[in-house]
Image: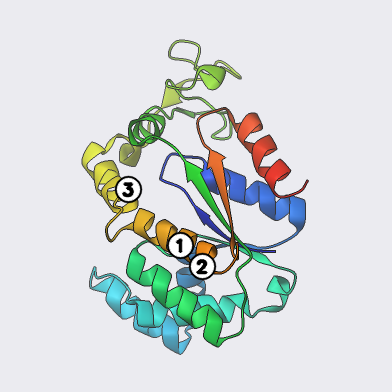
């Protein structure tokens, strides 16, 4: 089962990706991890990528895509994988599709977590971290995990916010890229939808409603994946 997973920041995509990883025993592959691994191992691609990163520049697709392909060829990907965080725009979607075809790697499923932009933004800015345990879920905009006033709903501990969760400008910039249907991530999603329509449903397109709680979203996801 080879999966591309799309969803805006704040949709819970990362959490659902980890659940798929555990349920199906396939690696949850994130581009940030691939970069760090190549840089730490001092690979040729890693050295090239580090140069761009050190200069504060985006790593070009000509480096990113070969890194991804190398990762997808590793032994733990023999039974499938879930790629998260790439492609981020239309050009990357086209180039990844081309590269996978050249390597004879068939993409089975494209999952799109659908969530209104304002809801996604609220969820990011509403996150609260428990000083006793960051794994205690608290969010002022989600009824199921709303804190007890200023205290953790699980243990009553003090709550804090992450600085980047409150950076409204940075959140808007990321969402501007994701929700852009002309050249951004949504344009990439639509590319795969068009591709599926032309190829008799390959890859299979799955829409996932990101509005309900974690449990409900997980249930819908696993049901659509046949579990």
Which percent across, then down, holds residue 36?
A: 47, 69
Q: Residue at x 30, y 79 (%)?
A: 51
Q: Circle 1 is placed at which residue position?
A: 194
Which percent across, then down, holds residue 192?
A: 47, 63
In space, the residues marked 3 and 2 are separated at their CA atoms by 24 Å
- Total marks in image: 3
Q: Residue at x 33, y 31 (%)?
A: 118
Q: Circle 2 is placed at which residue position?
A: 198
Q: Farthest residue toward the top? A: 149
Q: Residue at x 51, y 40 (%)?
A: 12
Say if mark 3 contacts mark 2, CB within 8 Å.
no
Say if mark 2 contacts mark 1, CB within 8 Å.
yes
Crowd band around label 1 with a 10 angstrom C-alpha radius: few (<14), some (14–19), many (20+) = few
Which percent across, then down, holds residue 97?
A: 48, 75
Q: Which SS class for mark 1?
A: helix
Q: Which SS class for mark 3?
A: loop
In space, the residues marked 3 and 1 are separated at their CA atoms by 17 Å
Determine which quarter of the picture holds residue 168: top left
Q: Residue at x 72, y 78 (%)?
A: 75
Vertical relation: 103 (above or below) 9: below
């Amino acid at each position: 089962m080879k999966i591309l997973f799309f969803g805006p920041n704040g949709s819970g995509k990362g959490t659902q990706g980890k659940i798929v990883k555990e349920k199906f025993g396939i690696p949850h592959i994130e581009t940030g991890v691939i970069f760090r691994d190549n840089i730490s191992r001092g690979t040729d691609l890693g050295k090239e990528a580090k140069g761009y990163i050190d200069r504060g520049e985006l790593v070009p697709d000509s480096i990113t895509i070969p890194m991804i392909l190398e990762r997808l060829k590793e032994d733990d990907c023999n039974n499938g994988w879930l790629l998260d965080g790439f492609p981020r725009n239309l050009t990357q979607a086209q180039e990844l599709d081309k590269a996978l075809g050249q390597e004879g790697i068939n993409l089975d499923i494209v999952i799109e977590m659908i969530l209104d932009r304002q809801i996604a933004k609220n969820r990011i800015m509403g996150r609260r971290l428990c000083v006793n345990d960051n794994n205690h879920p608290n969010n002022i905009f989600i009824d199921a995990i709303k804190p007890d006033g200023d205290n953790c709903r699980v243990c009553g501990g003090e709550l804090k916010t992450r600085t980047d969760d409150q950076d409204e400008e940075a959140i808007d910039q990321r969402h501007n890229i994701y929700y852009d249907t002309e050249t951004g991530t949504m344009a990439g999603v639509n590319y795969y939808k068009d591709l599926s329509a032309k190829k008799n449903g390959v890859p299979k397109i799955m829409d996932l409603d990101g509005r309900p709680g974690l449990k409900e979203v997980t249930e819908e996801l696993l049901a659509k994946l046949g579990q």
